[in-house]
Amino acid sequence: MLTGWVAPGWEPVRDAFVRGCADDPGAAQLAVHHHGRPVVDLAAGPPGFGTDSVGVLMSVTKGLVAVCAHLLIERGALDPDAPVARYWPEFAAAGKAGTTVADLLTHRAGLPAFSAGPAGCGLPGLLDRDARVGALATMRPVWEPGTAFLYHALTYGHLVGEVVRRVSGRSVGAFFAAEVAGPLGLDLWIGLPAAQEHRFAPQFSVRPDPSPEQVAGFLAGLGLAPDAPLSRALRASQAELAAAVRGLATREGRAAEL
């Protein structure tokens, strides 16, 4: 079912959108602004799904959290080259005294997963922010911070978000709402408000999660030994991501500032 509109002259975009969605079992939205003017606002999907529907953006939230940190940097309240421990003293534990704010922002902190390697702490509950933040503060990095990169799939928001909270005195969701989304008039949240729940479109995957054998094959293709720190971190990240996706299927999960 197609809903929405296109400005005159943009009908070919609509037609291409329809073709692209023809064999898709899910739903899609497309919005285009041309020189600051909205020209396309379309949605395709089952009845009830439209241009006003919202969903979980998953890792897009990392960019939103980073925007909050950069606003604080721009205002002189946060120094990207300063140790994280200047703002979050507990974070200095287990060899992290020299980890900088920039290391967190650039996925170089060596904390890509809660359960990575022998220093891992197991996976705290998805909604237990205090437990997750506390676990990260006590964890030993998988590598020396600042010397390597690995996408921090499930820890980035807690790491950078806690710095935002320590500096601003507000949770990252509250800071984003007041300083970014509110002033810009965005229908965008870190933690979906209950008043917006009726707009939520349930999400599903048409592909199963990778099997342990597939993950092992991927790591072997990268030339990584199974017990290498990077291998352990990647396996832990994959397992934690699957658990997080299941948690986001609940109202409590969508309301969490993740």
Image (tube, rainbow, N blue to C red):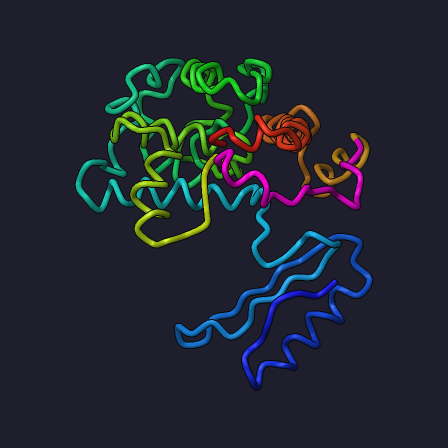
Q: Which residue lies furthest to the bottom in this view?
A: 9
Question: Residue 105 is drawn in which quadrant?
Answer: top left
Q: Which residue is drawn at 51% across and 17% down?
A: 128
x and y percentages locating residue 80 in the rendered image: 27, 38
Q: Is the magenta stretch mostly helix, strand or loop?
A: loop
Q: Which residue lies furthest to the left in this view?
A: 76
Between 236 and 242, the one nearer to me in the picture: 242
Q: Quadrant of the N terminus?
A: bottom right
Question: Residue 203 is drawn in which quadrant?
Answer: top right
203 in magenta:
yes
Question: Residue 23 is drawn in which quadrant?
Answer: bottom right
**Is residue 56 positioned above or below 125 on the image?**
below
Q: Which residue is drawn at 37% across and 47% down?
A: 181
Left/right of residue 21 with respect to residue 144 in the rendered view: right
Between 152 and 187, the one nearer to me in the picture: 187
Please tell me how many numbered marks the rendered image carries.
0
Left/right of residue 119 with respect to residue 109 in the rendered view: right
Between 41 and 155, the one nearer to me in the picture: 41
Q: Residue at x 55, y 35 (%)?
A: 153
**Is residue 20 positioned above or below 178 on the image?**
below
**Is residue 127 positioned above or below 51 on the image?**
above
**Is residue 130 positioned above or below 159 on the image?**
above
x and y percentages locating residue 243 in the rendered image: 66, 26
In magenta, the rendered stretch is 193-211
x and y percentages locating residue 12 in the rendered image: 65, 81
183 in magenta:
no
x and y percentages locating residue 207 in the rendered image: 79, 44
Left/right of residue 177 with respect to residue 10 in the rendered view: left
